[in-house]
């Protein structure tokens, strides 16, 4: 068994603490940068109200772009479960953003189209023999104050929920705000 002197042990502990602080700081900075600098899009959502024993109430969100029928948009063929996907979004007249394309790799950025990165969770055949792609974007859980879930669940059937998402140039997305009838009810604070 080796003897480690107290000064060497202190240096090692400080190094470990600095590395952990750096990693946590990078995670916070990454999120702040996304919310501050990402392009904003509004997406319609359909929530479900589960509960996490450690973190409280949250809403599971499914977006108007979470299930795509490939016959309705311009799409690369041959998607499989687990494939990364870049969904092109265009703004409609009502202010919502809708899927217009799906690609295996991120296309060149067009100022009118925003690409959001997701992962194909399942592929099935539709009635017209096209593919139905189910996609997750990494922002399907949104934590809310305890007890607010049932109220949001009631609003689900009214189709009045939407989000404002920030999307980086690389396609990563995060929720900036949860909206009811177009008005923010929960907003992510940068600090």
Image (cartoon, grey):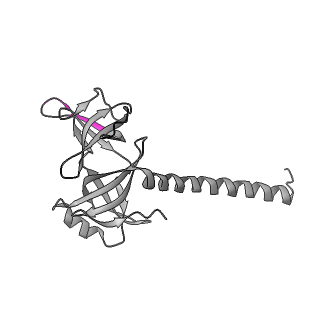
- Toward the top, the furthest residue is 77
Q: Is residue 108 above or below residue 3?
A: above
Q: Count numbered badges in the picture.
A: 0
Toward the bottom, the furthest residue is 147
At a point 42% along the width and 42% down the height, the residue shown is 169
Residue 165, above or below 119: below
Q: Closest to the observer: 1 or 127? A: 127
Residue 33 appears left or right of 48:
right
Q: Position of residue 114 (x, y in %)?
A: 33, 42
Q: Residue at x 30, y 40 (%)?
A: 113
Image coordinates for residue 164, horizontal then vertical, percent: 32, 56
Can residue 139 be seen? Answer: no
Which residue is more in the foreground, 76 or 78? 76
Foreground residue, 191 or 151? Answer: 191
Q: Is residue 148 above or below residue 4?
A: below
As drawn, is 156 to the left or to the right of 28? left
The percent coordinates of residue 21 (x first, y second) are 63, 57
Pick the residue in front: 120 or 190. Answer: 190
Relative horizontal placement of residue 160, taking residue 121 as reference (left or right): left
Whether residue 124 is in magenta: the answer is yes
| Name of the residue lying farthest toward the front | 111
Q: Where is residue 163 shown, x and y percent of the image? A: 30, 57
Location of residue 9 (image quadrant)? bottom right
Residue 63 in sight here = yes
Is residue 60 located in the magenta-colored stretch of the structure? Answer: no
Q: Which region is colored magenta?
A: 122-131
């Amino acid at each position: 068994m080796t003897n480690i002197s107290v000064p060497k042990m202190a240096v090692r502990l400080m190094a470990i603490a600095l590395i952990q602080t750096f990693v946590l700081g990078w995670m916070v900075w990454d999120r702040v940068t996304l919310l501050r600098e990402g392009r904003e899009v509004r997406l319609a959502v359909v929530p479900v109200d589960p509960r996490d024993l450690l973190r409280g109430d949250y809403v599971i969100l499914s977006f108007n772009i979470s299930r795509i029928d490939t016959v309705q948009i311009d799409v690369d063929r041959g998607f499989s479960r687990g494939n990364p996907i870049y969904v092109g979004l265009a703004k409609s007249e009502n202010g919502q953003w809708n899927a217009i394309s799906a690609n295996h790799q991120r296309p060149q950025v067009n100022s009118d189209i925003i690409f959001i990165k997701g992962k194909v969770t399942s592929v099935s055949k539709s009635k017209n023999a096209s593919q139905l792609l189910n996609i997750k974007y990494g922002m399907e859980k949104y934590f809310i104050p305890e007890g607010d879930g049932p109220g949001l669940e009631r609003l689900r059937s009214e189709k009045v929920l939407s989000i404002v998402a920030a999307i980086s140039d690389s396609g990563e997305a995060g929720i900036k705000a949860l909206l009811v009838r177009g008005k923010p009810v929960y907003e992510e604070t940068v600090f």
